[in-house]
Image (tube, helix red, strand yellow):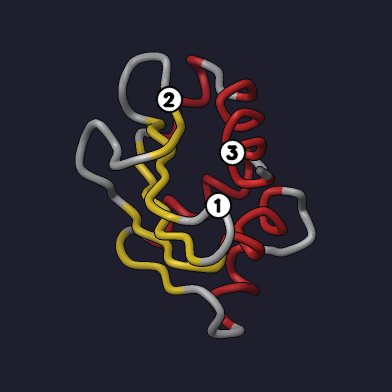
Amino acid sequence: GPVAETFRAIQGAMTEEYVRSTQGVFQFELSGEGGGTWYIDLKSKGGSAGFGKPPVAADVVMSMSSADFVKMFTEKLNPFMAFMSGNSCIKGDMMLTLSLEHML
């Protein structure tokens, strides 16, 4: 589905340099089609992304619909716009959320 494809793209876009500079772990609680718990680990060596809980504790937990998540990563939705519109909830380090935007 679109969520799994998005995570495959994220995994493919990861670089050692990006992981080193970000040092953050993001957990996504997605509702709707392809939902569930997903993560992006930009802290462990090499980084990783995929389905399930992150291998280490998340610095940021974002809750949103899977449709909004896919939109966010296809650049149709700014993470802060999603947050401001009340469609998503962000817990944790807001500054790390900014760094996620650079990856998008």
Disc 3 designates what residue? Answer: 4
Circles 1 and 3, Cβ within 8 Å, touching? The answer is yes
Image location (x, y in percent) of residue 24: 36, 39
Circles 2 and 1, Cβ within 8 Å, touching? The answer is no
Image location (x, y in percent) of residue 70: 67, 53
Which image quadrant: the N terminus? top right
| Amino acid marked by disc 3 | Ala
Q: Residue at x 48, y 55 (%)?
A: 97
Q: CA distance from mark 1 to mark 3?
A: 7 Å
**Quarter-wise, where is residue 12 in the image?**
top right
What crowding class fits label 2: few (fewer than 14 Cα within 10 Å), some (14-19), or many (20 or more)?
many
Going from N to C along the chain, the mark reached first, 2 or 1, is: 1
* Left or right relative to 27: residue 85: right
**Quarter-wise, where is residue 9 in the image?**
top right
Identify the element where label 1 is drawn: loop
* Left or right relative to 78: residue 11: left
Q: CA distance from mark 3 to mark 2?
A: 13 Å
Going from N to C along the chain, the mark reached first, 1 or 3, is: 3
What crowding class fits label 1: few (fewer than 14 Cα within 10 Å), some (14-19), or many (20 or more)?
some
Q: Residue at x 46, y 31 (%)?
A: 49
Disc 2 designates what residue? Answer: 48
| Amino acid marked by disc 1 | Gly
2 shown above or below 95: above
| Amino acid marked by disc 2 | Ser
23 shown above or below 97: above
- Closest to the camera, between mark 2 and mark 1, is 1
Image location (x, y in percent) of residue 3: 61, 46
Question: In this orientation, which residue lies closer to the viewer: 22 or 74?
Answer: 74
The disc placed on residue 34 is 1
